Amino acid sequence: MADNPEHELEQRRRLLDVASRFPLPNDGGGGAGCRFSYGTAGFRADGATMPPAVCRAGILAAFRSLKLAGAAVGIVITASHNPVGDNGVKIADPDGGMMAQHWESFADALANAPDPDALLQLVLQFAKDEGIPLGSHHTAQVLLGRDTRPTGEYLLDAALQGINAIVGAHAIDMGILTTPQLHWMVRSKNKGVKASESAYFTQLINSFRHMLELVPKDKSGDELANKLIVDGANGIGGVKLEQIKAELSGLDILVRNSGKEGEGILNHMCGADFVQKERVTPHGFSPEDVGVRCASLDGDADRLVYFRVSSASDNKVDLVDGDKILSLFALFIREQLDIINDGSKVNKPLPAKLGIVQTAYANGASTQFLKDLGLEVVFTPTGVKYLHKKALEYDIGIYFEANGHGTVVFSENFISQLESLSKELSSQDDNGSAQYHAVMRLMAASQLINQAVGDALSGLLFVEAILQYRGWSFQNWCELYSDLPSRQLKVKVIDRSSIVTTNAETKVSQPSSLQELIDKETVNYSHGRCFVRPSGTEDVVRVYAEASTQVEADSLAKSVAQHVGRLLG
Ligand SMILES: CC(=O)N[C@H]1[C@@H](OP(=O)(O)O)O[C@H](CO)[C@@H](O)[C@@H]1O
Ligand SMILES: [Mg+2]
């Protein structure tokens, strides 16, 4: 425990005190009688029920930093794409990624500890098991950020009280930020580089400009090429984009649902999740926008999709989802690697293991397209924490969920090889060569893309730079491949956790009869694919179906959703 009895007493007192200030409600927290579960992306529920979970997340984050010898850890208070009344909290590890999964069971136990004594005993036992020095001269630091939700300010204070309950812990409130900004700041702080918001903006703006400088001079886009309308989901992403758009040379950005006071409700009839799931124009867009390239961010700007208003007669959109963003990134990166390793001209090849990571929600056509390119495609369960961890196994790992969560991660080793090759080529006065330019493009890309976590702002700039590099219109991008018709439905049930899945969530093991019913329905459709899983962020069961036609995909999704409703009502 502690090397000093006084410190030990002080630590015990603080923990009992803070736990008594934020007691769990009678239903055990998390709302609707269910317990808090760290889930796909942290604790998330109705904002009014969140203070105990957020306070305990503060304790958890300080503990995590103590365990990691005082390395900075992050707390983000957000509920991402959820309705404005929800809120949530997630922890960023020192590398900027999501908290290591093996700490999630402690997180759940801490969030659901029924009373102060139980919480104290849990903390003391965990500290002993993990060899965490409590109450001594060790320090911890936690960076905090939140989005624009009305419950955010109060919940931030709850997190601060949780952090300060750990002797030696130091909280740094980084302000109202996008989720990726906070993750980037944690990663930067632990890499010993400037971690301020202005440093984040400077890196984005400069690397974007550098990417455009490396666009071959003969590439000319159509007159609409530079115009982009962005749906900011009435969230923090729109606010931040407004702040930097004037610095983004070569882009004429118009932000709607910008998050300005009174313009609209967060994620309501707008935002990346709405556009990706409903495939209709978000609030504020109209048939007058037909033909213009549009993008949509989600409420905390860690998701990005593109779209185009299909026609002047209805509110349908042509969607470019995370799968197609991933494909654009993969094509670009693979092309630069081919130029660098072009056998006829290169003296020293640059071997690179390129990996693509998807989930079961990826459209079958995207996976086929990527495999036909000869790329290695692997699958993980839903949730950035799984895809990011898998992507780190490659020299260059590209991951995206269909809903627009995703990024590119470059290994340190690959970056250092790129740097040496760029020095070698420039010393050979070869900096006009195609190989040198390809090396510089990948280096600029590694600076532009947020390697900590999926980032809608950095992802948008990377897309725009690649479209300009290829001289592509939105139509060219759409034509990469044609999505198989699909449909996603949400089913409200009594207890969604009664569904247990296997095989990266593509099969249901509990209740045992459900998978048989799914298979019986699916076999009736050519190219039929359907799976069911409990949401980790909303109190629903999600149904995903694909088939040869939209009518069939809708029918398959509906029939399976009815089985779910009947079995789990
Ligand atoms: C089908 C879908 O979009 N699921 C989303 C959603 O998770 P669920 O566990 O499905 O609610 O939110 C996660 C966090 O944003 C995101 O990673 C995931 O892809
Ligand atoms: Mg989000």
Image (cartoon, helix red, strand yellow):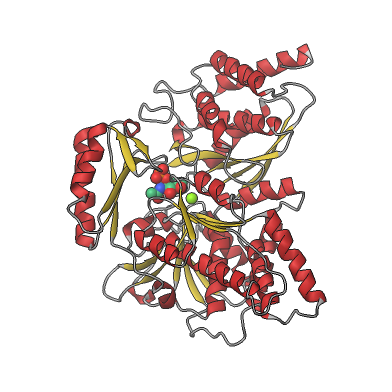
Q: Is residue 549 left or right of residue 86?
A: left
* Residue in front for this viewpoint, 267 or 384: 384
Q: Position of residue 196 (x, y in %)?
A: 71, 53
**The C terminus, quarter of image:** top left
The residue closer to the viewer here, 551 or 36, is 551
Question: Where is residue 131 shown, x and y percent of the image?
Answer: 69, 22
Q: Please name the residue shown 36% across and 63% down the image.
A: 365
Q: Is residue 2 left or right of residue 355?
A: right
Residue beneath the point at 51% across and 58% down? 260
Question: Residue 202: x percent and y percent?
Answer: 70, 63
Which residue is farthest bottom?
218
In which image quadrant can residue 231 be found? bottom left
Side of 328 where 522 appears, left or right: left
**Residue 569 in view (yes/no):** no
Tell me what residue is drawn at x 57 percent, y 43 percent: 98
Q: Could you tell me which residue is drawn at 48 percent across and 34 percent down?
A: 38
Q: Above or below — where is 386 with respect to 441?
A: above
Residue 157 image point, x, y percent? 60, 35
Note whether 308 is above or below 383 in the view shown.
below
Q: Nearer the viewer, residue 136 or 545?
A: 545
Q: Let me know if residue 51 appears in the view.
A: yes
Nearest the camera: 192 or 510? 510
Which quarter of the rendered picture does the N terminus lie within? Answer: top right
